[in-house]
Amino acid sequence: MAEDLVLDTAIRDWVLIPLSVVMVLIGVLRYFVSKLMRSDQVPDVKIVKEGQLITRARNLRAAANFIPAKSFRARKHYYSNEENGLLHVPKGQAQNPQAQMFSDPNMAMDMMKKNLSMIIPQTLTFAWVNFFFSGFVAAKIPFPLTQRFRAMLQNGIDLSTVDVSYVSSRSWYFLNLFGLRGLFSLILGEDNATDDTQRMMQMGGFGFDPTRSLGAEKDNLDIVQHDWALPKFEQRAESVLKKLVQQ
Amino acid sequence: MAVHDDSNGQKKKSSDALDEIPTFNVENMQNNTRIINYSRTFMSIIGGVIAGILGYTALTGFIFYFVIMAITTVGLAAKTGFAVHSFFDSWNQIVFDGILGGLLSFVLFWTFAYDMVHIF
């Protein structure tokens, strides 16, 4: 550290605190706006059915060892026989998810709303920060960093002599943008709409094909090794109960 | 730790009855994991503010963070009555989960409090 900069306390009162408070409030506002804009579309009956079916099959797979072999075989047959098993998808009937997406304008609309609710506030806040707070040295991180971080932390001030640990106001905005996620998950609940990275992931996995997951679940069910866990549970229960009675 | 909800958040393992068959409730386990994450986030924010107010810099602050996380781990373990395996898969989960995730929050609040108190 060459020499310490003396920062005006007015910068704290009029840049650092307002900026941080505004970031928190905008996060909260975004959460509620996206909650308002979320349309409660009626889900497609077929898709819901398939989802429930997969859940049922998964439950059977998870609890397979707690039912007798005969019962398990019967249930397995019900789900995965080749003629009319629930999980069996006839060939050629699988529909293209891409086509399905385009045939449903609601879906695209919803996506767009979500995206807009993400992009618009960020652009606006960034513009606002640029307009009001550009060029301040707003903060100083309490640990030293190498020169490489200069572009990240001193975005907006072009002084190569200032120590890297000083943070410009614009970079403070970015730090807030990423660092407040933890706070939001505390004050808004786990599934708050501000979690951008998660939304990206969802967008990536959008071409979700229900028929394929049906097939996968069928394969999973087929390879389950049934091994009844409770062959002697009646005797065991008897002994436990006896012990209880004796006490 | 104020974020514990213990009423339904327990994975009950039927301990002696069914030997060696792992039985657990997926929802409860997810709930437990969520509680870990909440606790860690909460502690990292509080720890950041404390570190900032105390004026820790550089390595001291990071050591403080890991001390805080260790305290959180002990607290969580105490909350389970040191029977970690009836609530979680392994010790790893209770010791390491969410430590990196909380670091960013910690740094942010550390910086904020440090600047408030010591820089200006």
Image (tube, coloured by chain):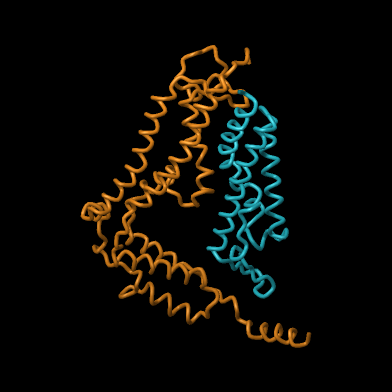
Chain colours: A orange, B cyan
Q: Quadrant of the C terminus of chain A?
A: bottom right
Rendered residue at 74%/84% (across/down) = A244
Q: Is residue A119 left or right of residue A170?
A: left
Image point (62%, 27%), residue name:
A142
Image coordinates of residue A38 in percent, x first then y, are 34, 53
Q: Nearer the viewer, residue A145 or A42?
A: A42
Q: Is residue B15 above or below residue B105?
A: below
Q: Eyeballing the image, is A232 above or below B24?
A: below
Vertical position of residue A57 compared to residue B75: above or below = below
| Residue B54, position as x, y percentages in the image | 70, 32
Residue closest to the eye, B72 or A13: A13
Rendering quarter of residue A195 = top left
Quadrant for the N terminus of chain A in the image: top right
**Hey, which residue is sitting farthest right in the picture?**
A247
Tally the numbered discs.
0
- Residue A64, x across and y down, in percent: 51, 73
- Up-down relation of residue A107 to residue A47 (above or below): above
Name the residue: 36% across, 33% down: A123
In-image side of A174 versus A123 (left or right): right
